[in-house]
Amino acid sequence: MKMEYALLAFVSTHAAMAAQRRLQGQIPFTVMPTLRAITHSCGISLRLAPDDVPAARSWLQAGGMDQAQVRYFAVYPGECCTPFPFSSPAPDSV
């Protein structure tokens, strides 16, 4: 089944806002409420195209975001979310 979109959920509002600032103008995203099934989140998420998630992860790491502050999810049609299926570790920098 093809992934509908990717969702980045954050442990704090501060982390969500920092991610928005870091990704603005680099990767297209939409700010949205976190899905109800994701319980460990501040309530603010970023919706991205699945192909943009590895680059977003690299941009966030390069900007100094602790990866414990963000969780990456894959959302499929008719289903909730599962952890994003990364094929490799994030590069050290962008």
Image (cartoon, rainbow, N blue to C red):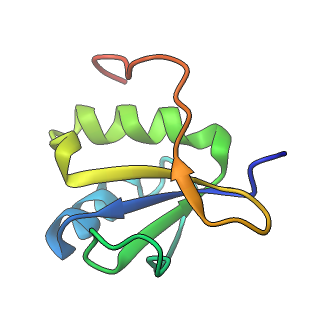
Quadrant assignment for the C terminus: top left
Residue 10 in the image: above or below residue 70: below
Residue 28 in the image: above or below residue 12: above
Residue 32, how many percent across, how many down? 50, 79
Task: In the displayed orientation, state which residue is furthest to the right.
Answer: 1
Residue 67, how many percent across, how many down? 22, 41
Q: Nearer the viewer, residue 34 or 83?
A: 83
Q: Residue at x 50, y 52 (%)?
A: 73
Q: Is residue 29 left or right of residue 13?
A: right
Q: Is residue 78 left or right of residue 86?
A: right
Q: Residue at x 25, y 76 (%)?
A: 42
Residue 7 in the image: above or below residue 35: above
Q: Residue at x 25, y 69 (%)?
A: 17
Q: Is residue 92 left or right of residue 66?
A: right
Residue 31, how many percent across, how many down? 48, 75
**Callout count:** 0
Q: Nearer the viewer, residue 23 or 65?
A: 65
Residue 33, how many percent across, how many down? 45, 83
Q: Is residue 65 left or right of residue 90?
A: left
Q: Quadrant of residue 1?
A: top right
Q: Residue at x 30, y 61 (%)?
A: 21
